[in-house]
Amino acid sequence: MQRRDVLKNLSFLPLTGIASTGVDGKIFEEKKVLEAPTRNLFEELGVRTFINAAGTYTFMTGSLMEDKVVKAIQSTSKQFCLLDELQDRVGEKIAALVKSESAVVTAGCFSAMTLGLAGVLSGMDLKKVEAIPHLEGTGMKSEVIMQKGHNVGYSHALLNTGCQIISVETIDDVKNAINEKTAMLWFLNIQSDRGKISHEEWVALGKQYKIPTMIDIAADVPPVSNLWKFNEMGFDLVCISGGKAMRGPQSAGLLMGKKDLVDAARLSMPPRGSTIGRGMKINKEEIVGMWVALEYYVSRDHSADWKTWEDRVATIQKGVNGINGVKTEVKVPTLGNVTPTLHVEWDEANVKLNSKQLQEKLRQGSPSIEVVNNGENHISMTTWMLQAGEETIVAKRLKEELQKAS
């Protein structure tokens, strides 16, 4: 392209004139290209955004990444590196933070479960790695034992390996179910109150029979101590989501635990092909972003965060208290999403709408607000995903809708 063509094309760009002196002493106008205005891509796409008073649900895109995480992602997007070398170094950093022998960044908690079990099945045998999920005739084990109350949809991550699930209820059931096909004992923390066997008893059974134990703690931080609690308790593998409380990339997670098992799990991960985990790709930016998110999360003043959440809940609670027929209560879940949660209930005789109608009015309002529908006349909300000042908007809109229906 000739110089005149370059100058011609520049005429189509937004410009500002600056008087300058050329080398021949003549004055000319230097043209500087202005930065294009930031595009609102959600607006262009017609995608609704909202104030998140519900929580870190995947269908609501989890949490919002911290600025530090976004900067880490941006800075690492401009250079190349070897994926395995990066996983090695980041894994060492993460393992130190969570007090485990080893760790690796995965494509979410679900993928951590599939990969972790794949590592248990194959060990370091590459032929077995490539055979999964076709286990028959390979010599690999094929059964995973879990408590009946823990057998929910997330256990499908284990079925992906070709294993069968064996449901049990008591310690004696476990002992009777264990055989030469038993690959692993799996525990779901969020459902721990739905089973008869405690965490400690589950770990003890694994050690007694020399069978690896895995725990899923996908959304079970806070408290921050859960990041290392189950490693220290003796679980061989721990799986967690990265895009919830830690505010890492929504598509990231962690597999942490015994080094030999994490090493074996990595044989089923990208960049290797011909494996069950090839589609569970995690890129360099997400790997670094997850490490930075975890590092920042662990170092936070968690007491101060809790106080902020409580203050926000109090603001919303104050906004609706006094409306005839409406009652509020603050509760803290004991297992997952352990944050101050505001429950709002009302008497249908005084407030003429149900929870689904209220939820929809808040959703369709401006700004849009998401809350949790808990039954006919009962909603709940959390404040840990709110941004500063949004609690006053939620309080105002909730009060408006309840008063309109009174």
Image: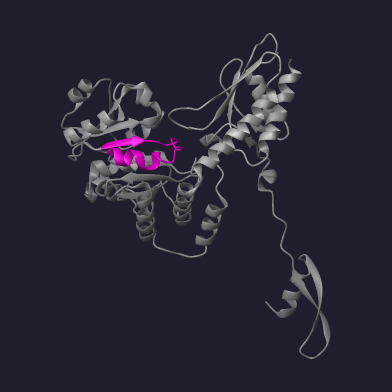
Whether residue 78 sits left or right of residue 237 in the image: it is right
Report which quarter residue 88 is drawn in. bottom left
Q: Is residue 217 above or below residue 12?
A: above
Q: Quadrant of the C terminus?
A: top right
Q: Is residue 350 above or below residue 308?
A: above
Question: Residue 76: x and y, percent?
Answer: 50, 61
User: Which scheme is used to colour this image of the protein?
Assistant: one colour
Question: Residue 243: x and y, percent?
Answer: 49, 43
Instruction: Residue at 58%, 33% (x, y): give it.
Output: 310
Q: Quadrant of the N terminus?
A: bottom right
Instruction: Residue at 45%, 55% (x, y): give it.
Output: 288
Question: Residue 152: x and y, percent?
Answer: 39, 26
Q: Residue 90: tell me if it is visible.
A: yes
Whether residue 387 sits left or right of residue 84 in the image: it is right
Q: Of 65 and 277, which appears nearest the observer?
A: 65
Report which quarter residue 190 is drawn in. top left
Q: Of 282 and 383, which appears nearest the observer?
A: 383
Q: Residue 151: tell me if it is visible.
A: no
Please give the range of residues in magenta.
213-235
Q: Is residue 77 above or below residue 376?
A: below
- Residue 214 part of the magenta-drawn span: yes
Question: Residue 171: x and y, percent?
Answer: 23, 23
Q: Is residue 384 above or below residue 29?
A: above
- In the picture as drawn, the residue positioned furthest to the bottom comes out as 24
Whether residue 42 sits left or right of residue 80 in the image: it is right
Instruction: Residue at 33%, 33% (x, y): give it.
Output: 159
